[in-house]
Amino acid sequence: MIRLERPRTEPEPLRQKRLEKLAAARTAISGGEKIDFSGIGDDGVKEALFQAQHRKCAYCEKPEEQSRYREAEHYRPKSRYWWLAWTWENLLFACIDCNRDHKKDQFPLVDEARRLVAEHAAPGDEQPLLLDPYEARIEPANEIEFRRENVQGRERWKPYGITERGRETVRICGLDRPSLLTLYDAHVREVVRPKVERFRRIAEAELTPDIVRAWGTLVRGLFGEYQPFQALSRDVVRVLVPTSLRARYQLAL
């Protein structure tokens, strides 16, 4: 997971839909009926978030081909926070695996007694244990890190929470699920390691201009906007390129 930047302006159709849907939701609740959540994201929201996230899942960073068959994900689940279902700041784009198969309506808090009361604005006094990739005050790299392991003689990189929030986020979103671990392995083997090895061969010559240029190429190749699994790439590079080498040539990650 990496920190994301939400577009400042919400799609205009969402504002209009919020006014209509909230009124209908209140009527449904007063009549003991179910709230109609259909159509969330079909007003340009999904596509706007899809493009803002550079076509990647907000939680696992897996690339997606298109947004058409995906749902708009609610950071605070609509089943528990119905009045926020059409709130721009509560929406993000997520893959089906993270959203439907793992997160679902999970939203644990440090203190359950501080959970928002209906119709109150977020975040209130809540302290969520699920990281919000759009929260500017949070840096996911300080909460979750990828560690190298040896599994039956093979290298494997796996995410671990280094804070309670990080651990809960890994668990809730299934960031260590087998299918993702397989994708992580392929990304390191086929993308990260070849680029790192090219950089290290150039670094062996100890020619500063060449090293700086090679580092720029490495960084652009792994951390461009549309590159997947940037959090993984960052931790792999941190391990494979010694701190002393990066410090010597002032190579920033």
Image (cartoon, grey):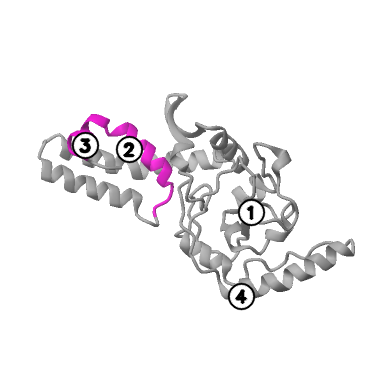
Residue where numbered disc 1 is placed: 122
Residue density around tag 3, few if under 14, some if 14–19, many if 20 or more, within 10 Å: some
Q: Which residue is drawn at 79% across and 70% down?
A: 24
User: Given the image, on which type of amino acid does mark 1 rest?
Assistant: Ala
Residue 241 among those drawn in magenta: yes
The residues tagged by marks 4 and 1 sit, at their Cα atoms, a distance apart of: 22 Å
Q: Which residue is drawn at 36% across and 36% down?
A: 236
- At which x and y percent is residue 8? 49, 65
Q: Are marks 4 and 1 in contact (CB under 8 Å)?
A: no
Lower sequence index among marks 2 and 3 = 3
Is residue 76 at all visible to an observer of this figure? yes
Is residue 91 at all visible to an observer of this figure? no
Q: Helix, strand or loop at disc 1?
A: loop
User: Given the image, on which type of amino acid does mark 4 rest?
Assistant: Pro
Placement of 153 over or under 124, stated as above or below: above
The residues tagged by marks 2 and 4 sit, at their Cα atoms, a distance apart of: 42 Å
